[in-house]
Amino acid sequence: MSKKVLVTGASRGIGFAVAEAFARNGYTVFATYHNTKNTLTKLSDRLDAEGYTLIPVSCDVSSEESVNAMFSEIGEVDILINNAGIAQFKLLSDITCEDWDSILNVNLKSVFLCSKAASFGMIRNRFGRIINISSVWGVVGASCESHYSASKAGIIGLTRALAKELGPSGITVNCIAPGVIRTEMNAHLSDEDIRVLCEETPLGRIGEPEEIAQAALFFATADFVTGETLSVGGGFGM
Ligand code: NAP
């Protein structure tokens, strides 16, 4: 039987590419959306016609009630990919407590909620892979994105702690820290912004969502790697 994978925030961008890549590699994929369902419905139909399985599921990953309802619906999973996230560009002086809570809840509390819910089945089965999507900003910090950077650094700390706690149960926990990737999250960047970012990147370009999917597939099959954070950003932020 094929392994079951849950990818959060899969309606577009990195999560969409990760969900499609796992489905095409023979996994049964549960792909979550929050507001945008139609992209996943279309992907699901396309993959179904080719003999692959991707099932869209609704979830607000920042809500304990919503996460638990989703797990009741889908049951145990072998692999969890905590990808859903939001960003905001603000000076520290302009960040409100609501902004802080919103970023921390969607980006970090979600990883706690989904990992906890997935862990019960993984511990029972003595097998699991948890793959968290952090950011280069969680490693080096970004000016005007202090709440986002803190949430992404928190994911790295949580990854290391859970790797230690869950390792004896046969569960690996790893993290991917993407550099600048071509998704809607970066749609606000001008051509000039992108040119400067490319100049600052040793490999001379921004990344594609499929390149994060490659790293996620690696962690899904790497049996003796845990607690690691892999930068996938063409050397950006080194
Ligand atoms: P994106 O294109 O903006 O997509 C974000 C995804 O998260 C969407 O599927 C969205 O779902 C989902 N989402 C947002 N709030 C949610 C909530 N409360 N509950 C459930 N799902 C929610 O972003 P992306 O660029 O693909 O980013 C994916 C991850 O990579 C994020 O964690 C981001 O921080 C990280 N990352 C991105 C970059 C980059 O350069 N793009 C770099 C480093 C790290 P709906 O559309 O259905 O609302």
Image: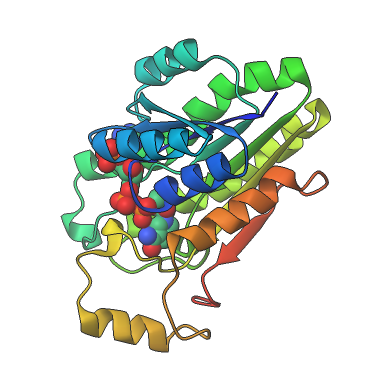
State the quadrant of the N terminus. Answer: top right
Residue at point 28% right, 32% down?
34
Answer with left or right where residue 199 lies relative to residue 36: right
| Residue 102 in sight | no
Give the farthest residue toward the top. Answer: 72
| Residue 111 in sight | yes
Picture coordinates of residue 147, whole percent (x, y): 34, 52
Residue at point 44% right, 35% down?
49
Answer with left or right where residue 35 lies relative to residue 7: left
The answer to whether 87 is drawn above or below residue 231 in the figure is: above
Check the image and tell me how it is coloured. rainbow
State the quadrant of the C terminus. Answer: bottom right
Q: Quadrant of residue 195?
A: bottom left
The answer to whether 129 is drawn above or below residue 89 in the figure is: above
Q: Nearest the camera: 71 or 211?
A: 211
Residue at point 78% right, 49% down?
225
Give the farthest residue toward the left. Answer: 94
Answer with left or right where residue 60 lies relative to residue 35: right
Give the farthest residue toward the bottom. Answer: 199
Picture coordinates of residue 73, whole percent (x, y): 45, 12
Q: Quadrant of residue 88?
A: bottom left
Picture coordinates of residue 24, whole percent (x, y): 56, 44
The answer to whether 209 is drawn above or below residue 167 in the figure is: below
Residue at point 63% right, 50% down?
217
Q: Nearest the camera: 102 or 55?
A: 55
Give the farthest residue toward the front. Answer: 49
Picture coordinates of residue 176, whole percent (x, y): 57, 55
Count the marks: 0
Q: Nearest the camera: 113 or 50?
A: 50
